[in-house]
Amino acid sequence: MTTGSDVLELAPVIPVVVVEDADQAVPLARALHRGGLGVLELTLRTPAGLAAIERVAAEVPDVVVGAGTVTTPEQAERAVKAGAAFLVTPGCTDRLLDGVAGTGLPFLPGVSTVSEALRVAERGLSALKFFPAEASGGVDYLRSIAGPLPALRFCPTGGITPDNAPRYLALANVGCVGGTWLTPKEALAAGDYARIEGLAEQAAALGPAAD
Ligand code: 3PG
């Protein structure tokens, strides 16, 4: 896996995970894997995020673990040291883009406008996160920009559910979707990994909606 485009090919859904306790990371990664998903994005929005990445990278070799909610070059550096295989950012300042590109890891920069997408494309990138997808215009927006931006492909996240995911996956400029619905807060708190496995199984089977 060398580019952001490779990240888009790993699964129909990238589970976006917020962990409160790094001890949850390995069992949840294994549950996702049993359900059929070999990728997950552990966000750095909680203090446990970095240690969680470290554990999954060391103990669950069958799962590709990325770092999400990377908002500074310093976080990108720390995620690399923890063993992240890819990086995801919610937005794209020049400083952040320089920082994540400097790590040499594949990454998905977050964009929500055409101008942001063009700025990122000027750097030679063609795989982007579209965030926050539903709030930014959703399926209609992505369909509208496919004409003027034919080389770009997206991972929409933010408001994606098993119900609306197939409509995104049917778009030519969508490689996969991302979302937090696979790891509900209460399931993690209760250690209900069977539920997470079931949600992963359902997500792994998602595909394009028929018209
Ligand atoms: C993200 O960081 O990608 C989003 O917070 C995921 O959004 P969701 O909680 O609506 O899936």
Image: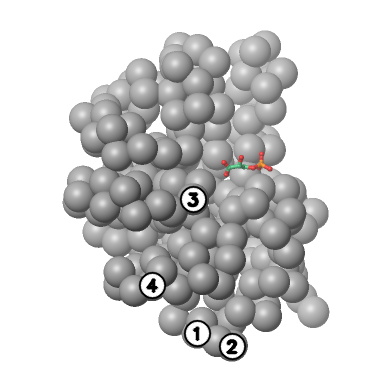
Dot 4 amino acid type? Ala
Quarter in which the C terminus is drawn: bottom right
Residue positioned 67% across, 11% down in the render: 190
Q: Spatial distance from mark 4 to mark 3, Cα to Cα?
A: 14 Å
Pair 4/1: label in front: 4
Above or below, 68 relative to 203: above
Can you tell which mark lies on residue 147? 2
Q: Spatial distance from mark 2 to mark 1, Cα to Cα?
A: 6 Å
Dot 1 amino acid type? Pro
User: Farthest residue toward the bottom?
Assistant: 147
Of marks 2 and 3, which one's residue comes earlier in the chain? 3
From the viewer's perspective, tell me whether residue 104 is left or right of residue 20: left
Q: Which residue is mark 1?
A: 150
Q: Spatial distance from mark 4 to mark 2, Cα to Cα?
A: 15 Å
Q: Where residue 179 sits in the image (x, y, percent)?
A: 62, 44
Above or below, 71 relative to 155: above
